[in-house]
Amino acid sequence: MSTVMLFYAGMALIIGIVFYIGFRVKRHKRLVISKIIAYIQPICASEDTDSCIKEKKYRKFEALMRYPKEDGTYSFPEKLLKKSPSFIQRKATLHMLHLVLDLLEKHPDIELSININYKDVTDNRCRKKILALVDQHKCVADRLIFEFIENAKLKDSKKAIISQFMDDVKKYQCKCALDDFGKDYSTFDPVLSFKFDILKLDRVLCEDFTSDAKKFYLIDMIVNMCQRFDIKTVVEFIRWEKEATSAKIMGIDYIQGNFTGEALPPSNYL
């Protein structure tokens, strides 16, 4: 191959790499961290659902990440997050934590939970920043709940890091919850491996559980297990009063869903 051909081949390769990097950067910049906002959804004690809903006496909420769509509405940016590199995902978590801590500072009578990924914790830099933020806001930390999303099988070395993180945040009286239990290929391993204070049953179990015998008895079994382990339970995706009533009878501690209130901007509830 002649020198000229090698030169042009090299130039083509360089141009291709530059365009590829530019495309990747442009694609990842679509998720602008500063545009992320927090919606909140009420969580009501099953024993006190009526006053919680009718009298608007909401005290517990889950903070949910929302991002603007082209039509001006907001939704969870699932696709954008999945396409984003890990450092962008970690930044999104930290940004949400800032928003949640700010709400806790402004509203001393509420509790807020925030979704957190196992990878957020096993990433050294992100974990240290989370702990630093909790320490900076220690006066509100006892009203903060970390909801761990079960989405990966963990090695023992990773489990040790997560267990230590839980111990660290619990020194500030934070609580830890296992979210989406029953979704996809979730197992009992996290319940056995970590010291969770709360277990949240996923929509796949909760949807229409009053008319599905398998779901009903499976939820009943899980609730009995949690009571033995001194773990509070939350049933999600509650839409009807009969579901809320059944949850109370079954001994479920908290209910969440459109029956208690849909996810909205904080000003709608606070």
Image: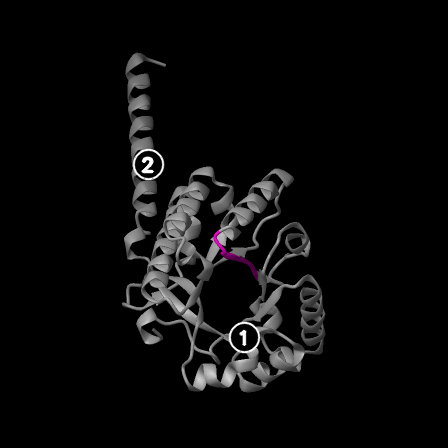
Please state the horizontal and vertical placement of residue 207, each as a whole percent of the image.
58, 75
| Amino acid type for the residue under numbered disc 2 | Ile
Q: Does the magenta stretch include residue 173?
A: yes
Q: What stretch is highlighted in magenta?
A: 172-179
Asked which quadrant contains residue 97, the reply is bottom left
Distance Cα–Cα, label 2 vs label 1: 46 Å
Looking at the image, which is closer to me, 97 or 166? Answer: 166
- List x then y, in percent, for residue 50: 50, 86
Q: Mark 2 points at which residue?
A: 21
Whether 84 is among the magenta residues is: no
**Label 2 Cα neighbours within 10 Å, binned few <14 / some 14-19 / many ≥20:** few
Looking at numbered disc 1 in the image, what kind of residue is underneath it?
Ile
User: Which residue shows up at 58% across the image and 49% down it?
Assistant: 152
Q: Relative to residue 228, is residue 239 drawn left or right?
A: left
Disc 1, SS = strand
Secondary structure beneath label 2: helix
Q: Nearer the viewer, residue 164 or 39?
A: 164
